[in-house]
Image (cartoon, helix red, strand yellow):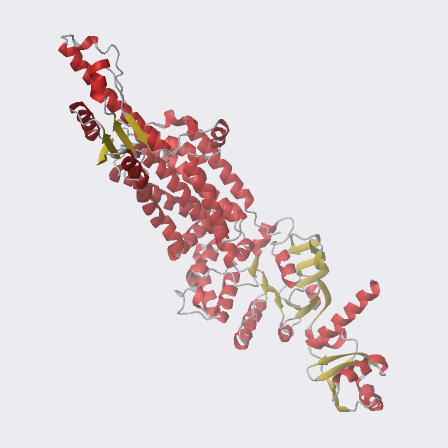
Amino acid sequence: MRVRRIKAMVVKEVLQVWRDPRSLIIALLLPFTQMFLFGYGINLDLKHLPICTFDREGSQFSQDLLKRFQASLYFAIAENVKTYPQLAAAIDRGDCQAGIVIPPDFSERLNDTGSTSVQAILDGTDDNTANIALGYAATVVTGYSNDVRISALARQGRALQQVLPLAVQSRVWFNEDLESRNFIVPGLVAVILALVGAQLTALTISREWERGTMELLVSTPVTSTEVMVGKLIPYLVLGWLDAAFCLIVAALWFDVPFRGTFATLFLTTTLFLIVVLGIGYLFSVLIHSQIGASQIALVATLLPAMLLSGYVFPIDQMPAFIQKVTYLIYARYYVTIIKAIFLKGAGIADLLAPILFLAIYALAVVALAARAFRKRLA
Amino acid sequence: MTAPVAADAQVDAQVVVENLVKRFGDFVAVDHASFRIGHGEIMGFLGPNGAGKSTIIRILCGLLRPSAGRVSVAGIDVARDPELVRQRIGYMSQKFSLYRDLTVEENLRFFGGIYRVPRGELAERMRFAIDMAGLGGREKTLVGTLAGGWQQRLALGCAVLHRPPILFLDEPTSGVEPKSRRRFWDLIHALAADGVTVLVSTHYMDEAEYCHRAALINQGRIIATGSPDALKHTALGGELLLIECEALGPALAALRQQAPGVIDASVFGNAIHVLVRDADRGIDELPAYLERRALPPIRIERINPSLEDVFVQLIAADAAKRRQAA
């Protein structure tokens, strides 16, 4: 490897990127829009879920319970209906995603038997939301139910301690507010870097083929490795800029707590960038058209990074076979790493395993890319 | 345009090709080609598109692997050490292959870096290339916006930046207007005068006249090699007559049958070129021969063969030879 030749490649590549609006848009505009689009668009927190109430009793008790729903952060009463058909219509229209129906004998049965029930009707078309809503509804009802019992017992003059023998004292670590954004946004950085990184380099060799400049380049004494290194360096710098931009937006704009160190972040991000840039380069070498290379790189990086990296969809919920497949998804390691750095403040020692996997991946991709690009044409 | 180099070409060969074969699947692109190019010699490759000129040049540059045969450039076996060869050659590909989105200066600097032209010399070499291409004042112009002739001269400038002793130019003048072509050949001659060995391919037959020696290539085979004069006078194996006639077709058929002393005949524009063993006898005998067949010639005269005549004749002879062999 000759530094002089690598330098010539780097300078040439920088000039070309600088004059190519397509590369610049990918490098600068894409991360910007993606970060905000997905950062805001994907929110798994259920807050202020619109519900309708159907109070068939209209008593003090029933209204008390419904006030609890109203007061809860999780629900917002969109409508009070008077009949079942109205309730069904409201769910059909999508005005509300759940209905709470209080039976006409609600307080009567509560007084007589000490136990009564409330009906929750859920829109199961979105089963995830329905499940979570059901859980929250149960919590609201249980809370109310406990209060009812406590006040009944208090009237009998018994102390509260005897009432609740066991209670869970939960403490959430790392993402104290259980804000889904806190775990989505760091993963999002990984997805964006995977997408942008591979797109940048996917164009770089195929462009030389398409424009016919490869013919001359191959006839010069420059080696395959020099070409690769010279072409990857400018994009690594662009990748660092993109990473810095995404991470700053994550920490400052989306207020994701950053508890790790910059050194860990820099090391792991660089490894990840080498992997994604190398993969884009590999496609660029194998597919001689810019469009083809860019499309394949898009499918090969974005889909696995989105679906199989654990960025949104938890890996341990996947079928056993798919879980095994995720070990091949390099984005998985960086998602793990970056979430741990952000939220847990993990250092290099804590992350040895994923860092090692990522490093092996980086080496393999670079070795493959260097081998794939042979200067001899045929 | 001729130079006293052909004689010592065999001794001081910069390019040696022996029994070179290149197959792409079943297709034989180069069929047992052998030739040598001497130091400071300009060798022209002539032939129609698809004859195999580019394939041979690309093999010489180490861009293609030969299927069989031996290829050595600057005394180095190309198959064994293509990288070493690449440092000693300059190459201009058939398709323009400089960076159109870089300026004149940026392209030169890039190739200067890739060839590791010593830093102290680079400015002077770039100046030389810019002056040679006549691009003074356009150093900051994007190459893509330059006219064809300028682009070609810049490509030559990039190819000689590192002072390679050997230049491979693959159809450097195709698509360039005649005045620029002429100027381009002047540059090639200036380089050869400095001792650079040049192999240049073209499908303009007239350009062969600028070469010290030319090789005629057809269907992957080198069918003749020699100086343009030698080719014209010996390769034909006869002398050339031009005959103008009312009915070209029947006249051609008649001449090809058993006309006295005729080796071959072919149509050139609105006349027939007839290859005869002896031009004077032909002028005596052929008018009578044609008149007997009611095809009186309007004009008959001896002409100097052009390389195109030579080429057409040699291709026909080559095809006949192959038919016989098969």
Q: Position of residue B291 (x, y in %)?
A: 82, 91
Name the residue rendered at 42%, 38% in the picture: A305
User: Relative to the observer, which residue lies in front, A128 or A245?
Assistant: A128
Q: Is residue B293 visible?
A: yes
In the depicted structure, whether residue A183 falls above or below residue B72: above
Name the residue rendered at 34%, 50% in the picture: A29
Q: Position of residue A102 (x, y in %)?
A: 24, 26
Q: Is residue A174 visible?
A: no
User: Relative to the observer, which residue lies in front, B197 or B68?
Assistant: B68
In the depicted structure, whether residue A142 falls above or below residue B191: above
User: Relative to the observer, which residue lies in front, A206 or B46?
Assistant: A206
Name the residue rendered at 66%, 55% in the picture: B72
Q: Is residue A304 left or right of residue A101?
A: right
Q: Is residue A356 left or right of residue A143?
A: right
Q: Position of residue B39 (x, y in %)?
A: 63, 63
Q: Is residue B286 left or right of residue A119?
A: right
In the depicted structure, whether residue A106 falls above or below residue A326: above
Which image quadrant is residue A335 in?
Answer: top left
Q: Is residue A210 left or right of residue B238?
A: left
Name the residue rendered at 35%, 39% in the picture: A189
Count how many numbered circles sit on residues in the image.
Answer: 0
